[in-house]
Image: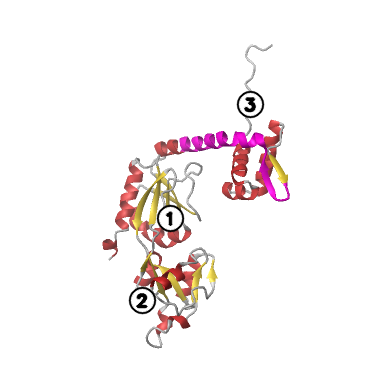
Amino acid sequence: MAVNPPSPRLPPYLALRAFEAAARHQSFARAAEELCVTPAAVAAQVKVLEQWLGVSLFDRHSQGLSLTPQAQRALPALAAAIDQLGQAVQTLRSETGGQQLHVAALPALAQLWLTPRLPALQQALPRLQLSLSALEAPPNFSREAYDLALFYAPRLSKGCQRIVLAQDALLPVCSPALLRTGPAPELAEQTLLHDSVWNTDWARWLKASNRSDVPARAGPRFSLYSMALQAALDGQGVLMGRASLVAAARAEGRLVAPWGDPVPLPETIDLLVPTARAGQDLTQALVRALQHLSDPARQG
């Protein structure tokens, strides 16, 4: 018998991570979306773990997946361990990351709100190295290596602070080309342009403005707000603009808003700061700079 026998090896982390995501979502496809891999890759990693354990972790059937009793009992502790590991890595990054920050942002906010402010931000913080990624939903800071996030976020997200940067409002906008023949034409006669995610924006504005004469859901839909905005700039119709996102085009005279007053949005533009990052000097400097660049008085 060996005096110092080798310690039993743990299963591969990738296999554990794939199983935890698949078990939490009850789906290989949704786990693959979270992990940015293919469903086949998730299934292969789960198979690796099952072979290592010598048991099945999922019952596979025509309706999808269900956890075995053993897997159900193990999942809470495994999920907590992965969260703790993610938080430890975030703390390590925050203490050793230097002047680099990784920011996740909603695509429309990244392109139309943050990017125009980057030159002024770089001038205010010349040593800052900013990495920007477009995401459709706020990241899980316990699992994903982002330092900050920029989203329309009416609620406080778990594990982070919420800092309101700007209020926003809805108002119909169009190209000046639609007005060349005289005063603003009847809104009910125009082609309405819609963003497919913010698909209630027209209904919100019309209800608040007491405009029952305009069909709220008529008109083409676009999967990206930037595409709907470009259609409006090209004179293809009237977009229900979010004031913060169309501000630059209006200031340049490429869009006008001749149909009524803005209607405030309940959702604010928020900076989400993970708890591990909140006290860091660089984070605080970036928050102050963004608050300054968001000041309506400064915008003129």
Q: Is residue 2 visible?
A: yes
Between circles 3 and 1, the one closer to the viewer is: 1
In the image, taking residue 139 as reference, residue 277 lies left or right, namely: left
Near-viewer residue (157 or 123): 157
Q: Is residue 123 visible?
A: no
Near-viewer residue (6 or 26): 26
In this rendering, the answer to whether 138 lies above or below 201 is: above
Give how far across and how far down residue 81 sits, in percent.
53, 34
Give how far across and how far down residue 168 sits, in percent.
37, 63
Kindly identify the amino acid type of the residue bearing the numbered disc 1: Phe
Q: Farthest left residue?
A: 297
- Residue placed under numbered mark 2 in the picture: 260
- Residue placed under numbered mark 3 in the picture: 9
Kindly identify the amino acid type of the residue bearing the numbered disc 3: Arg
Q: Which residues are magenta?
A: 61-89
- Residue placed under numbered mark 1 in the picture: 151
Say which element carries label 3.
loop
Q: CA distance from mark 1 to mark 2?
A: 27 Å
Near-viewer residue (159 or 115): 159
**Is the stretch drawn in magenta largely helix, strand or loop?**
helix
Q: CA distance from mark 2 to mark 3?
A: 68 Å
Give how far across and how far down residue 156 sits, in percent.
41, 49
**Residue occupying the point 35% across, 40% down:** 280
**Residue occupying the point 71% across, 33% down:** 55
